[in-house]
Image: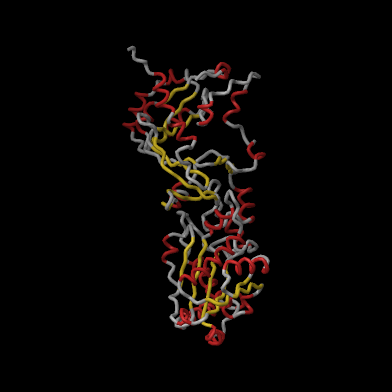
Amino acid sequence: MDFSELEKDNTGRCRLSSPVPAVCRKESCVLGVDEAGRGPVLGPMVYAICYCPLSRLADLEAMKVADSKTMSESDRDKLFAKMEENGDFVGWALDVLSPNLISTSMLGRVKYNLNALSHDTAAGLIQYALDQGVRVTQVFVDTVGLPETYQERLQQRFPGIDVTVKAKADALYPVVSAASICAKVARDQAVKNWQFVEDLQDLDADYGSGYPNDPKTKAWLKKHVEPVFGFPQFVRFSWSTAQTILEKEAADVLWEDSPAQDLEGPERITAYFNKGSRARPRAPHRYFQERGLEPATALE
Amino acid sequence: MECRGEAVVEKERIHLRPVTLCDAAPATLHLLPCEVLVNGPAPVGRFFTPAVRQGPDGLQVSFRGRSLRGEEAAVPPGFTGYVMVTEDRGERLKGKQDFSGSSESDGERDEQELVEAPESLEREFDRFIGATGSFSSFTLWGLETAPGPDAKVHGALAWPSLAEAIHAQVPED
């Protein structure tokens, strides 16, 4: 996998794909969708699709693809290499969603939750395959959230395709297993070669699995918290693990859309108006109010 | 501007150290659309500046996991921006050294002593302020969308030219 695009800029999202096998433009294809790195508080989430002609499904199965979680890292790497060798009938595509993209989506003014982001990414990849000319007739998806509503939504979006959304689809359908291997191999590689945007001194790469319940990951987060900026962008700020550490170890930050009760905080600049005097000062002219201009009569 | 509160504010004598205005090095400034409830230095150059990207719709970055869009805001013509720091009472000597610039050669110190108020005079001031940086523009950030021409800050920066116009002598025709 060529991650040079991602290494150039890992603040957004990045798509990678294999060339489309010629046979996949001619024959009906089956396509699997799966993801890796949904749970961790660190690093990107990777969505993957894998597809092959229905007529070659047995050949894909013969490669002994299985749920990526049941395999060792080296076995996954070997299987991915095998899929690449069979690029004449197996194709894949990935969408790498940076932790920064995940944080800013989930913490947006209008919350864009992880399920919605996942569903849209999966649909985007299926569309990408169609746009590349792959003749997709069947799609199998490992579910995120309730399989029924997810399936209904995908079926509506792709009326000409037979969509199946199931829990544990990565263990049930070989194309989904293959997609899970692509996703996991990509996620591991992306995490291993992560280019920190920040200039971090004595960065320690021993962050464990990246899962919130991993003591190593927690220790790493606590070690790398910065009182003003919080964490490097490698961390998903929207995870409760990250938020809890920030509440304890970093400065509070108030936004214009923060809940109103939080706005009391320490003394505001307007407070000096009332100091020592009961008389309410006359409000400044609207011109100044609209521009946030206030007379300064003392240095704070 | 007239303000009734002014009358009750304790009068302070503040001395602005003039040398610091000439010495102030150019500073890079970012105005964020949030309040960080702490005062002090922050590693902007290591955490924030390297993360700024030129996107299709202007500058973009994130702070604490929230997306920001930015634009350059210029200090009004005829003005210079300064980052001012007040010295705490009783910290005068220390503060003076802080403001004396990065190269603390004896020659420069001497020069400063000449321009600064002599010790006897210093006692008459309550507080001292000095510039630690100067700027002619800064980056104005908005939460998820660029602040745009209607932003309060742009309006505020237009006040000096309006103030000049309304206070100018009206020509007698």
State the image coordinates of residue A27 (x, y, percent, origin top left).
49, 82
| B151 horizontally vs A169: left or right | left
Image quarter in which the C terminus of chain A is found: top right
Tell me if residue A203 comes above or below residue B48 in the rendering.
below
The quarter of the picture where residue B169 lies is: top left
**Quadrant showing the N terminus of chain A:** bottom left
Count of marks placed on residues? 0
Locate residue A112: give its quadrant: bottom right
- Residue A246 locus on image (x, y percent): 60, 50
Q: Residue furthest front?
A: A160
Residue A265 lies, with reference to residue A17, above or below; the image says above
Residue A233 in view (yes/no):
yes
Q: How is the image coloured?
A: secondary structure
Q: Give the left or right position of residue A257, taking residue B144 as reference.
A: right
Figure check: A275 above or below A110: above
Q: Residue furthest top?
A: B172
Residue A128: image location, x then y, percent: 49, 69
Q: Is residue A112 left or right of residue B163?
A: right
In the image: residue A28, left or right of residue B57 = right
Asked whether A260 or A184 is in front, the reply is A260
Q: Position of residue B75 (x, y in %)?
A: 39, 34
Q: Is residue B89 visible?
A: no
Residue under the image location 56 percent in, 47 percent down: A227
